[in-house]
DNA sequence: TATTGTTATACTCTATAACTATA
DNA sequence: TATAGTTATAGAGTATAACAATA
């Protein structure tokens, strides 16, 4: 790319901007963009957006979970769940069901199609990460995951 | 945050959603949100947005860099640079200057105020990361940075 | 009073496409 | 034809504030 005849600016080499390259935030963002774009390209046009995949995962793992609980788990606002649940319900992957004893809440339960769709999506996502991150060893991936969780736990400190 | 009072559902514990917690992409995003929010809170209301900080860093480090080159460095589109450069120019931190020999391009040069503002912002950002990530050792931060760069280098594979 | 789900709204970040002026 | 900068526009993603129903 960008084959200039007289190349005046350094381009592409990841370590030529020390002021940025030494920042965790910068590196986190750049890495996330790479993973996100590959995720989207792999799952395709009507694949689940990351939040939708995450919400479905929770509903499958914790049947009868409420929207508020999903929001808390994912660290997003209640209001954001509505569109996500609408989409999953429209695709007949989950159902909103009344909860005896508290008529404010609606429990979310996965349909059989929802469980199957999640299983397939999980396979796709795992395959995408395995392929994209094949230059990292299993040990490196474990280390990375452990360090990322440490950052999450640093919240509020 | 989210200190639950009456807990009906498992909340907060980072390892209760194995389907998500084992994914690099999920952990990247969650970690990035923590760092981003602390960055914003630290830099304050009229602090630089991350992209503006990054662009200023490039202009300070490479005076006379062009907008297109900044965009390539940061992995964003040319069109996105316009608002960023507008903001930095309005705050009199950089200047668009004509380039003899090619009247299409405008070189970006930092003003003295721009260099000073960047130096201060760099201190603020470093302090924010040092404080937020104080539960990670220097060795862990180095490892994390190395692994994040590996992901970036995995792009297109 | 507090909480669940909801709507309306708006803001940030970012890309695509098309334009202009140059080259 | 191709490139640099620009504009207009649109689409994610996400939050805030307010509301109705219910607790």
Image (cartoon, coloured by chain):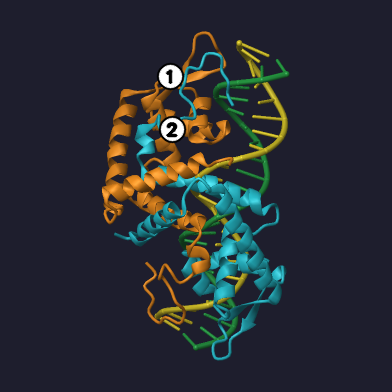
Chain colours: A cyan, B orange, C yellow, D green
Q: Is residue B40 above or below residue A156?
A: above
In screen coordinates, is A98 left or right of B128? right
Q: Relative to the observer, which residue lies in front, B105 or B131?
A: B131
Q: Secondary structure at mark 1?
A: loop
Q: Quadrant of residue C15?
A: top right
Query: Which of the two discs, 1 and 2, labels the residue nearer the N terminus?
Result: 2
Point out residue A141 in the picture as x, y percentages from the top left corner.
45, 54
Task: Tally the marks.
Answer: 2
**Measured along the vertical axis of the image, is residue C22 above or below residue B45?**
above
The residue beneath circle 2 is: B55
Residue at horizontal 47 percent and vertical 79 percent from the top:
B9
Q: Residue furthest bottom?
A: A101
Rendered location of residue B135, percent (x, y): 28, 56
State which quadrant residue B118 falls in: top left
Q: Nearer the viewer, residue B74 or B51?
A: B74
The vertical placement of D22 against A82, above or below, is: below
In the rendered image, residue D20, in percent from the top left (x then y), is placed at 59, 78
Query: Is A129 or D14 nearer to us in this picture?
Result: A129
Position of the C terminus of chain B, as image quadrant, is top right
Residue A133 visible at all: yes
Residue B44 seen in the current view: no
Please give the residue where the numbered disc 1 appears in the rendered image: B64
Name the subunit of mark 1: B
Above or below, comparing residue B77 to residue B22 in the picture: above
The percent coordinates of residue B75 (x first, y second) are 52, 36
The residue located at (42%, 22%) in the rendering is B95
Q: Secondary structure at mark 2?
A: helix
Q: Residue at x 59, y 40 (%)?
A: B156
């Amino acid at each position: 790319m960008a084959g200039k005849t007289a190349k005046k600016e350094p381009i592409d080499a990841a370590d030529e901007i020390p002021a940025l390259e030494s920042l965790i935030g910068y590196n986190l963002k750049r890495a996330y963009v790479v993973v996100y774009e590959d995720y989207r390209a792999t799952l395709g046009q009507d694949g689940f957006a990351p939040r939708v995949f995450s919400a479905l995962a929770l509903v499958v793992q914790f049947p009868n979970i409420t929207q508020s609980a999903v929001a808390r788990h994912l660290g997003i606002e209640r209001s954001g769940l509505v569109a996500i649940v609408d989409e999953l319900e429209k695709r007949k992957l989950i159902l909103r069901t009344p909860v005896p004893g508290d008529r404010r809440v609606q429990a979310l339960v996965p349909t059989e199609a929802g469980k199957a769709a999640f299983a397939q999506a999980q396979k796709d996502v795992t395959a995408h990460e395995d392929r994209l991150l094949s230059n990292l060893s299993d040990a490196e991936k474990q280390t990375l995951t452990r360090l990322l969780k440490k950052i999450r736990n640093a919240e509020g400190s």
